Image (spheres, rainbow, N blue to C red):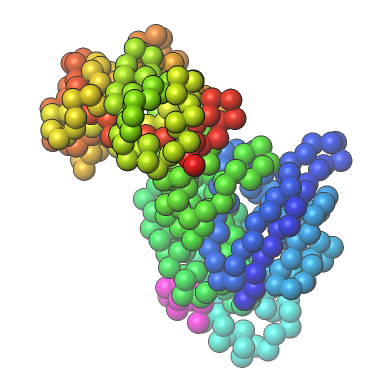
Amino acid sequence: MATVVLDGVEKIYDNGYHAIHDLNIDIADKEFLVLVGPSGCGKSTALRMVAGLESISGGELRIGDKVVNDVEPKDRDIAMVFQNYALYPHMSVYDNIGFALKLAKVDKNEIDSRVRKAAQILELESYLDRKPGLLSGGQRQRVAMGRAIVRQPAAFLMDEPLSNLDAKLRVQMRAEIAALQRELAVTTVYVTHDQVEAMTMGDRVAVLKDGYLQQVDTPQNLYDRPDNVFVGAFIGSPSMNLYEGRISMSGDTGTVTIGAHSFGLAAESLAARPALRGYDGKPVIIGIRPEDFEDASIATDAPADRRLTSKVTLIEALGSEIMVHFRLDAKTVDSGDPDAVEETHGENAANAVGRFSPRSPARMGQQVEIAVASENVHFFDAESRQAIWA
């Protein structure tokens, strides 16, 4: 087992493209760290540098107590699991799992012991004689995992290993991988573009954008205390609603204004973010998560000054909840996520989504009164786009 440390790591390609900027992450022994971000953010490049598949332009990379900047991949004591499984189609499952050990000239009895133990852990015992072409996607991914396990490496590196699976199988496999990592207690660096995958699997999550580390923290802290607009919007599904707004202070409370709408600022929000007092009358970016909008007919205890009125444009019924889309007369803010889908259906398109109780009587085309949980509203500086806290 080992720590993995990226200390000021840089990646600049021969054509001058700067893919990774001053990346600093300390990954603890046995930790499951997820690298997440939109397409082209540098997460796979960072992983490939740890693996030795990409050269390092600057900084220092350490695995355990050893600097490995110029160490060959085969000598780094890591095992990598790829998106496309990378199995040998002409070999049986048994031979695929044990192939790296065979190349390393490990004793046959030791190979057999390790392969069968990995197959038992991964529930592949009845498939050891089959070829990969006769397996499902999930089974093939288990074989790829088995090949990594038998090497008993200091660290696992996983590059979007579930992206080729269907949605239901992805949910199952992400739970299995997370449980397996905890059972084996191996330091793991996992790359994904799926923030739900990141939130449900990682001990900590590192969010990247344009080659820069935005924030690294536990999943819950990323959600509750994002450092900036990008992290706030990227973490959470549906995404945080973002608007241009202002704050007007009045004693221990205040008023939040977004476009033509205003609602009361909860005293507990101001207590948690004392720096808000310095933004009295100034423009800010207001972030409201979908669950902090609710049908006021359900949230009957919501104060009268924390309610908005709007017209419902779309309802997505999900059984345990409904996603209610509506339009606010307010200017939205671009989160900076290049993968985000912008609304392009004219001036009456929804620019807000709320996560309502399925008991809500809201109907498409009708006016609805919406309660705002203002104690949970996020505030960001309009220029720096950094979160406003202390």
Residue 263 falls in image quadrant: top left
152 to the left or right of 365: right
Closer to us: 263 or 9: 263
Is residue 387 found left or right of 90 in the rendered image?
A: left
Q: In this orientation, which residue lies closer to the viewer: 212 or 307?
A: 307
Q: How many circles with numbers are drawn on the protein?
A: 0
Whether 335 is among the magenta residues is no
Q: Relative to 39, is 126 above or below?
A: below
The one of 100 and 250 positioned closer to us in this rendering: 250
Does the magenta run of residues contain 127? yes
Place residue 300 in its image quadrant.
top left
Majority secondary structure of magenta residues: helix
Please provide percent x and percent y for residue 315.
25, 26
In percent of width and height, residue 158 lies at 59, 58
Which quadrant of the figure has residue 186? bottom right
In the rendered image, residue 191, in percent from the top left (x then y), is placed at 58, 52
Outermost top residue: 347
Residue drawn at (39%, 53%) of the image: 171
Q: Residue at x 82, y 51 (%)?
A: 58
Is 74 above or below relative to 85?
Answer: below
Residue 67, compared with residue 232, is above or below; it is below
Residue for point 54% across, 66% down: 31
Q: Position of residue 374 (x, y in %)?
A: 31, 33
Residue at the extreme right: 14
Q: Front-most of 318 and 238?
A: 238
Residue at figure coordinates x 23%, y 18% from the top left: 309
Quadrant holding the N terminus: bottom right
Q: Which residues are magenta?
A: 117-129
Residue 117 versus residue 257 in the image, above or below:
below
Q: Is residue 115 left or right of residue 124?
A: right
